[in-house]
Amino acid sequence: MDSLITAAGRALSAGDPLGALTRVALRDDPPALALRGIAMAQLGDLARAKLLLRRAARGFGAREAMARARCIVAEAEIALVSRDLAWPEKALDAARAALEAYGDRVNAAHAGHLAIRRLLLIGRLDEAERRLAAFDPTPLPPASKTAHALVLAGLAMRRVRTREARVALARAVTWARRARIPALSAEVARARRLLRTPAARLLARGESRVLRLAEVEAVFASRALVVDACRHVVRHRRSAISLATRPVLFALVRALAEAWPDDLARDALVARVFGARHADESHRARLRVEAGRLRALLRPVAAVSATPAGFRLVPRDASDVVVLAQPVEDAHGAILACLADGESWSSSAIALAVGTSQRSAQRGLEALAAAGRAQSFGRGRARRWLVPPVPGFATPLLLPGLVPE
């Protein structure tokens, strides 16, 4: 390999994309195109980077499978950063397998970390955890060990395990210092700030206060019956009853939890749960049916008792009843939580992350744009959505519709 390509590769590894471009900017051979693509990606020109990497992949011959695999991994990273979560997962897995077969453990590990980060974004935490368990970061260089620690911390935060997250972030700080890459150190610093910013809001006995992630974990570990409006789950200690697919029942249990220890009148419940301005006998009959369904589902942890005025939530073995909500609640709160990371998202990626159809995601994005709370650029499949980060809130931490263990 010629000296300019070697020097450019070393510059990229050290986080110096301008230094790499000065060596290969005027060359059009496949290795130079690949390095130029990676450099442009590090500088933020993702569209140009993607084109250069694809040209490089086409230029490598049949005997250069490892080089093509590296280009695929780099393109996958661009897709992840630009929140193109529909990028073919099988192509990344095939590239990782090829890199492992050729002994390129560093880039194979990088491909694995990209796949896990994608799983975290779309809420597939169990699969991400299984893949992480198979990783051995010991032989990797400091930059790769930093990436591994960041993935571990991200998983721990999504699982609401703050102690594990702090340990992983402490390791990330250590390895980032050894790597001496400023961008990597900045990413670690951003991850550490998430532990200090409000992640949820606690509603109990008519009062409201914001919680950091460690306080959310403490609420989950307490004796309280928790109505988790972030994941639509009712939990008490190790018991967790998901109502993610039962929006009417969840609206009912949340209304009762917010009124606890008092009962809530039937007319007020009809207005909260069904959105009816005036309750008639048909609404009251439907309310009785839904209360019976909720009673059957919550039997292990609570009872739903009828009172002369309405209904009351009665915990079986809990000292308190609390509601855990997003810091800023909105009809399109899940979409805003995705956009709050400051990255540009496609509507298909939003749909994957929040677990809805692409058309529903598009309607939500258009409503936010009409209200001036989101903006888009590009057209067709290249259209991306973004919004300035919501200051002081770490809403994505509790976004996935999964129950932390």
Image (spheres, rainbow, N blue to C red):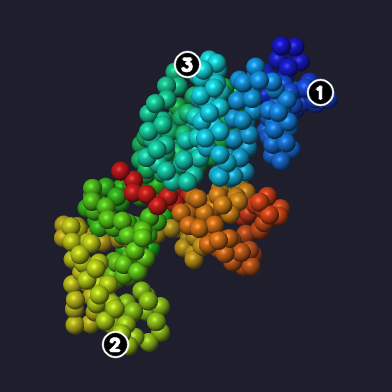
**Considering only vertical position in the picture, is 278 above or below 215?**
below
Quadrant (top left/top right/bottom left/bottom right) for the C terminus: top left
**Residue 288 position in % (x across, y down):** 24, 77
Q: In front: mark 2 or mark 3? A: 2
Q: Between residues 201 and 351, which one lies in front from this camera angle? A: 351
**Considering only vertical position in the picture, is 238 above or below 174?**
below
Q: Amino acid at mark 3?
A: Pro
Between disc 1 and disc 3, whose residue precedes? 1
| 91 with respect to 272 (left or right) | right
Q: Between residues 62 and 259, which one lies in front from this camera angle? A: 62
Which residue is tagged 1?
27
Q: In front: mark 1 or mark 3? A: 1
Residue 176 is drawn in which quadrant? top right
Between disc 1 and disc 2, whose residue precedes? 1
CB contact under 8 Å: marks 2 and 3: no
Q: Amino acid at mark 2?
A: Glu
**Residue at 71 percent of width and 53 percent of height:** 378
- Work out how far the residue at label 1 is from the one at label 2, CA to CA, in angstroms: 78 Å
**Residue 257 position in % (x across, y down):** 29, 66
Circle 2 Cα neighbour tier, 10 Å, few/some/many (<14 / 14–19 / ≥20):
few
Which residue is tagged 3?
139
Which residue is tagged 2?
281
**Residue at 44 percent of width and 18 percent of height:** 138
**Considering only vertical position in the picture, is 279 above or below 375?**
below
**Residue at 53 percent of width and 15 percent of height:** 103
Identity of the residue furthest to the left in this view: 316
Count the marks: 3
Between disc 2 and disc 3, whose residue precedes? 3
